[in-house]
Image (tube, rainbow, N blue to C red):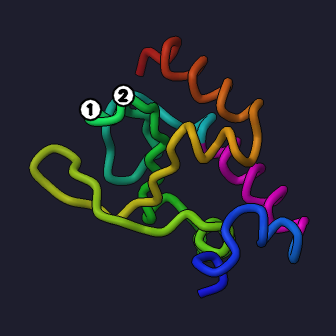
Amino acid sequence: MESKKYGFFGIGAKYPSLVSLAVEILKAKAKEACITRSNFRPFIRENQKTRELELIIPVASLSKLEKCVLEAVGFPKGPVRVGDAMIIAIVVGSFELGQIDQELMQMLRTLYYTLTC
């Protein structure tokens, strides 16, 4: 897949509108996010090993186009534990968000410390 070969900046050079579309998708999903872990709704968590904030977007909450765009930009699907179950989700760390959009990284931090749901 191209995302493995090019990464964020390679994809941005080859398809600049794809990165901006991914940023818009991530902003929309971050606004839907909650702190409570869910199988069907995006949520924000702190990675216990790295102490980094992560936006977890369950694949079930994405349209087919959103999935394709996020995977093409370099956010692969992977397993995430939610309670006693495992779900397939796209995990976006604050470091990756900082690489593509500083405003989005700040938005994630603000949401994490102000969300009450």
Tag 1–tag 2 contact (CB < 8 Å): yes
Label 1 to label 2: alpha-carbon separation: 5 Å
Name the image quarter holding the N terminus: bottom right
Please check the rendered image and state whether residue 18 is part of the magenta-colored stretch, yes or no.
yes
Which range is magenta?
Answer: 16-29
Provide residue 52's location: percent of width, then percent of height. Answer: 43, 32
Dominant secondary structure, magenta: helix
Quarter assignment of residue 4: bottom right
Q: Residue at x 63, y 34 (%)?
A: 31
- Whole-percent x and y of residue 7? 66, 68
Label 2 secondary element: loop
In the picture, the quarter occupied by the C terminus is top left
Where residue 100 appears, as percent x and y from the top left, is 74, 48
Residue ID at (79%, 61%): 19
Residue sitting at x 44%, y 34%:
44
Towards the viewer: 107 or 37 = 107
Residue 17 or 66: which is nearer the viewer? 17
**Of helix, strand and loop, which one carries label 1?**
loop
In the picture, the disc for residue 51 is 2
Residue found at x 78% / y 70%: 10
User: In the displayed structure, does residue 70 sit left or right of residue 17?
Assistant: left
